[in-house]
Amino acid sequence: KLEGLKTIAVTTNGINLTRLLPRLKEAGLNAINISLDTLVPAKFEFIVRRKGTNLSSKATVLILTGILCLLYLQVNCVVMRGFNEDELLDFVDFTKDLPLDVRFIEYMPFDGKYCCFEILLGQK
C-alpha cells in the first residue's frame, strides 16, 4: 500500500470479478464501480458481447460479493434512448435497499469520430 493513498477502485462489467475479487482485495482494493446498463439478460449480453453471462444471478452475486467484502460499491448505468430508458425504475427498485450508490450517467453521443445524437436521452 502507498502512503496517503486512501482508495483503490476498479470499474468493471463484472464478467471476471467474482474470480478475481479475493486477489484484488488482498492488493488493497476497497471500492468497486460496477457498470450495469441493463437488467435484461439479452441486452447485457449485447453490451458485453458475450453469450451465457447469466445476468440476473451475476448482478446479484456481484453486488452481494462486494457488500460481503466490505467494499464501497457504486453501480453506473449509462442511460440510452431506445435501449434502457424504460429500466430506470427497475434499477431503483433493484438497489433501493442495498448499501450502494447508483449513478445514472448520460450517454456521451460519440462513436469514434461520429456523433450519435439519436441515442442521447435528453436530446429533443
Image: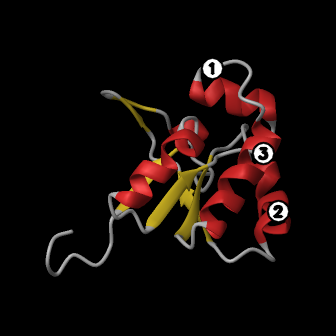
Horizontal and vertical percent for residue 89? Answer: 83, 63
Position of residue 51 in the picture relative to residue 48 (left or right):
right
Position of residue 113 in the picture relative to residue 19 (left or right):
left
39 over 103 or under it: above or below: above
Query: Is tag 1's residue or tag 2's residue first in the polypeptide sequence?
Result: 1
The residue labelled by disc 1 is 50
Q: Please name whichever residue, 48 or 86, is drawn nearer the observer in this view of the structure.
A: 48
Tag 3 near tag 2, CB within 8 Å:
yes
**Number of on-image labels:** 3
Q: Residue furthest left?
A: 3
- The amino acid type, in three-letter code, at marker 1 is Arg
72 over 120 or under it: above or below: below
Query: Residue drawn at (52%, 48%), measured in percent from left and top?
Result: 107
Tag shown at residue 39: 3
Q: Please name whichever residue, 89 or 102, is drawn nearer the observer in this view of the structure.
A: 102
- The amino acid type, in three-letter code, at marker 3 is Leu
The residue labelled by disc 2 is 94
Tag shown at residue 101: none
